[in-house]
Amino acid sequence: MSKDTTTAVPGTGDALENLSTESRKFAPSAEFAANAIVKASEYADAEADRPAFWGRQAREMLTWSKDFTKTLDWTNPPFATWFEDGEINAAYNALDRHVEAGNGDRVAIYFEGEPGDTRTYTYAQLTEEVKKAANAFEALGLVKGDRVAVYLPMIPEAVITLLACARIGAVHSVVFGGFSAEALRSRIDDAQAKLVVTADGTFRRGKPSSLKPAVDEALSAAGHTVENVVVVKRNGQDVDWVQGRDLWWADTVGAASAEHTAVGHAAEHPLFILYTSGTTGKPKGILHTTGGYLTQTAYTHKAVFDLHPETDVYWCTADVGWVTGHSYVTYAPLINGATQVIYEGTPDSPHQGRFWEIVQKYKVSILYTAPTAIRTFMKWGEDIPAKYDLSSIRLLGSVGEPINPEAWMWYRRVIGGNNAPIVDTWWQTETGAIMIAPLPGVTSTKPGSAQVPMPGIAVDVVDELGASVAHGHGGYLVIREPWPAMLRGIWGDNERYKDTYWARFDDMYFAGDGAKWDEDGDVWLLGRVDDVMNVSGHRLSTTEIESALVSHPSVAEAAVVGAADETTGQAVVAFVILRGSAVEDPDIVATLRNHVGHEIGPIAKPKTILVVPELPKTRSGKIMRRLLKDVAEGRDAGDSSTLADNTVMNQIAESLRA
Ligand code: WTA
């Protein structure tokens, strides 16, 4: 459970050296460059005066109900305010104003359900739905500042719920449907949520998959703050019902008035909380506020995806349970008046061509997905996408983890027709919006590198002491200046906010990622340098899974590492020391996997659990995860000279051979 602090400076090892010597480059076509919305001059414009640049974006991209006179206030670092005296309504910006501008008939959402059911919402229709939900939530007693927990599948009601909360100034806290009742309850409690919005369930690979039972279980013990649970009927499964607490969406939202006037909220009014894994066992409630967040998400969405809202069809495959589903499904595309696709299911349901069938059907022109998905498609074979017409695609995006050059090249050739630019976008739940990415009409892209900080963003790579490293060198990724969409804190824990992000280096935000500048000055992301793992682009904490394991009576000690995995980037590998007779239990591994599933959620279940007699520890009792990682990745363990007992690695090797 203790931390191994003996990590090497990232980018100095040999494994990644070859990555950043990648010399292939792909310039945008003359046609793409000529029609691109954002040109090269934007970098210099932003550099001249960053806050002023963001102030211009805020006014150009958004409609304010009260204009601001201040841009950035950084007099009390690390607590920033942006556009502080301005007032704005996020839902009005995403919806009403497009209708008022005469674009009410434009499609906002093409929804494709996993079983093949479809729904289309124009901007006028979506506005109406959000107004009804806003009225229904207010009728339940929600007022500005109240928190709403959202535990929904990827269906239009998720977007409608988030925007309805934003409209009335309630603060949404989405909990990914893959998290357990336990995890849901701790998030409900931490945010003191008054309302939960959920569904009976969803569909997963052709079968119904339930959600409401987890909400019931989460609320079964007294002491919570939830007054009502609004339930969307999605898969028709039978559900238990608590009279007086539970309400069907159709009876509440469906019956509400479609008249609702949006009022402006202060720019720094909280918009949402989103829990994410950190280096300790307890998830952090990342807090985002309104004006700055909307400014940077909208600007980056336009600039990075070169969005032409009248002609593009945009599809971001992220679930609303993650930050990408907030920034680049719920907020930015609608703020920018885009037409987007939302898909409920998995890429292999009912067949492995489902994504490409959707691209063909809706003529998707911009596709934004994750490296894990791309590597899975590679494994399935290129004859599958070859069966579909993908000629509508003109831009491809990647997010969530480093994309290896091989997957990048495959994505470009097989999905992008050797022509569509690829934008590899680096950012985090904490940054709120894209921070590093090529500009598709400007940057010559390089397989595997996210390349350049966005205009107005001050990224650097520094050494142990916080000094910038030269081109060709590696170190720690930091952000030197505040940015509009930055987190405003950790919900209820200002100290943790300061300690986690601002204490490692003076006056700089430490992202937790290793990075390297190549000789051209492009950034290469080298993965996390802390105890956070990235499995299929989902953030998981080693410590959190260790805590879950040791909470089982059969486990004496546990250590978890993220081991390299060809498809998922990393996979969770756990080393456990069992207690007493558990050693003889033939089902212990399955039992422990399910226990983690129950404590945190199915996504956190270790891929492999290895039962060992000992764990490698330093003399001060810290577990040396580096050595376990060597074992998990099938290498000879590296230098073990600092171990308290240097026979431990042999004991482990022996027990795994047995
Ligand atoms: C990783 C997801 C390399 C990184 C938006 C970061 C990436 C963590 C990339 C944040 C990328 C995200 N290249 N690594 N393009 N994008 N990451 O909070 O380690 O779920 O710190 O936000 O994902 O994950 P989060």
Image: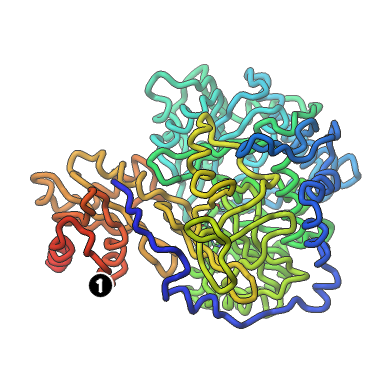
| Residue 81: x %, y % from top left | 70, 36
Q: Quadrant of residue 608?
A: bottom left
Left or right relative to 418: residue 527: left
Q: Quadrant of residue 138?
A: top right
Residue type at the position of mark 1: Asp
Quadrant in the picture for the C terminus: bottom left
Seen in the picture, residue 361 relative to 613 is either above or below; the reply is: below
Q: Which residue is mark 1?
A: 636
| Residue 315: x %, y % from top left | 67, 58
Is the CB of mark 1 within 8 Å of ligand 1?
no
Identified at 17% across, 43% down, the residue is 554
Identified at 23% across, 64% down, the residue is 640
Left or right relative to 619: residue 126: right
Seen in the picture, residue 220 relative to 425 is either above or below; the reply is: above
Q: Quadrant of residue 43?
A: bottom right
Left or right relative to 328: residue 474: left
Please say whether residue 598 is visible from this viewpoint: yes
Q: Quadrant of ligand 1?
A: bottom right
